[in-house]
Amino acid sequence: MNAAMKTTRQLDAALRIVHTLRAEGYEAYLAGGCVRDLLLGREPKDYDVATSATPDVVLDKFERTFAVGAHFGVVLVAEGDGDEYLTTEVATFRSDGAYSDGRHPDAVRYTLSAEEDVQRRDVTINGLLLDALRAADFLGDGGKLRAAVIDHVGGLVDLEAGIVRAIGRAELRFEEDHLRMLRGVRFAARFGFELEAGTRRAMQALAGRIHAVSRERVRDELTRMLTEGHARRAFELLDETGLLAEVLPEIAKMKGVEQPGQFHPEGDVWTHTLMLLEQLEAGCSMTLAWGALLHDVGKPPTFRRAPDRIRFDGHVEVGVAMGGEICRRFRFSNDETRQTLALIENHMRFADAERMKASTLKRFFRLERFEEHLALHKMDCMASAGKLDHWEFVRERWQTMPEETVRPRPLITGRELIAAGYAPGAAFKEILRTVEDAQLEGAIATEEEAMRLVRERFAGK
């Protein structure tokens, strides 16, 4: 099922839920982000329903349901199976109690009031409801849809003005759920909106509270910022609100760190990094995005003003160590960590590519997801002097070099060495590496030539 078909089916499923609940006498509306996106002419990722029906009613009215968040009044209503499997989140109107942990309400109280329900949400543009049955004929027309919108929080005005504003008192909204600060930044960046002044001030005052949020949730929000196509704006807003220094102090320390003008006419390390982030496309991989963000993270601690110019000796090695700590802090998977650190570790190697031996260049091409290394180097160049000579050389060689020459079948293995009388041990790795290098260089091409090389080089082993 393609994305467009799936989205249409999700909308149809949500409309059926609304129709069923309304036929039983309950209020039911499309709610939250899907309403916002429809009004902006964007394709919603999913469709949520808000209703006066309590979870037990929802569980009873639909054949296949999951009480995933019944404590908070949330039920998933499912349709189909296999590849056709779709779920719609149905949430009961509610009023939240205190948020002791800064993330979740200690208790909720169901209410029959849609107005009371939207008051607990985060920002006004996410607090809109849509009378979907009235709007069914206008779902492709944002202008006509407005007539079917129920707005208790001023979200329509803010949507028109391009403003992200917390609902009610911003301080209270962020004290309830600290993650809302990062979400507010992400929405502003994604839509090209401005943070309303009071909302911005509340973020600045409460930025330190973000440490109470799980690192996984912070990681997920940062990853969305990096991969939605507006990463530069997101990180500028993180900096302006004081959140950057809290969640990624290593990045905040890039500000004001000078670079040698002959290589980096764009300015300091922070400006350079922002220019990389600006090039990240929507939907890019999270490892490429984090690699772009962290590729120069080792520069601030290695800054040195030498007699000839500014230097960052060892910044790659330091950057790998710092990147590893950041990946651990945010609970990256082993695969995500490995690729992110590989991008940091290898981002300077392109400058040496034209002088590399054939075997070294081919091993370079063997790096996992080499296309990400190419993409990072190009962004790195475009965010500095703009010279793409090294990138063009490497890309041309990588694209034209046959796979069998980059990863040829080994001419010999340990089995052949043992048969030739060599005792298994640590020397095998060195021997096989030497043979493979010669093969990659084109110096040998047969098993016989490989064994001759071994006898010549490792006669005493």
Image (cartoon, grey):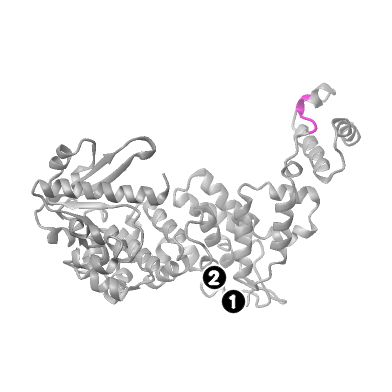
| Nearest the eye: 88 or 360 | 88
* Mark 1 element type: loop
Q: Position of residue 44 (x, y in %)?
A: 33, 57
Q: Residues within 10 Å of mark 1 (few under 14, many from 20)?
A: some
Sequence-first disc among 2 and 1: 1
Tell me if label 2 and label 1 are in contact, CB under 8 Å: yes
Q: Is residue 287 left or right of residue 33?
A: right
- Name the residue: 42% across, 47% down: 2
| Nearest the eye: 78 or 248 | 78
Q: Can you say which quadrant of the picture contains the C terminus?
A: top right
Q: Which kind of residue does numbered mark 2 sit on?
A: Met
From this view, report whether residue 158 is shown above or below residue 218: below
Does the rendering let one see residue 184? Answer: yes
The residue that disc 1 covers is 266
Tell me the magenta residue range: 411-415
Q: Can you say which quadrant of the picture contains the N terminus?
A: top left
Q: Is residue 83 left or right of residue 291?
A: left
The residue that disc 2 covers is 275
- Name the residue: 71% across, 62% down: 392
- Name the residue: 37% across, 35% down: 82
Q: Position of residue 328 (x, y in %)?
A: 48, 49
* Mark 2 element type: helix
Q: Position of residue 405 (x, y in %)?
A: 76, 43
Does the rendering let one see residue 104? Answer: no
| Nearest the eye: 282 or 189 | 282
Q: Position of residue 75 (x, y in %)?
A: 22, 43
Q: Which kind of residue does numbered mark 1 sit on?
A: Glu
From this view, report whether residue 78 is shown above or below residue 448: below
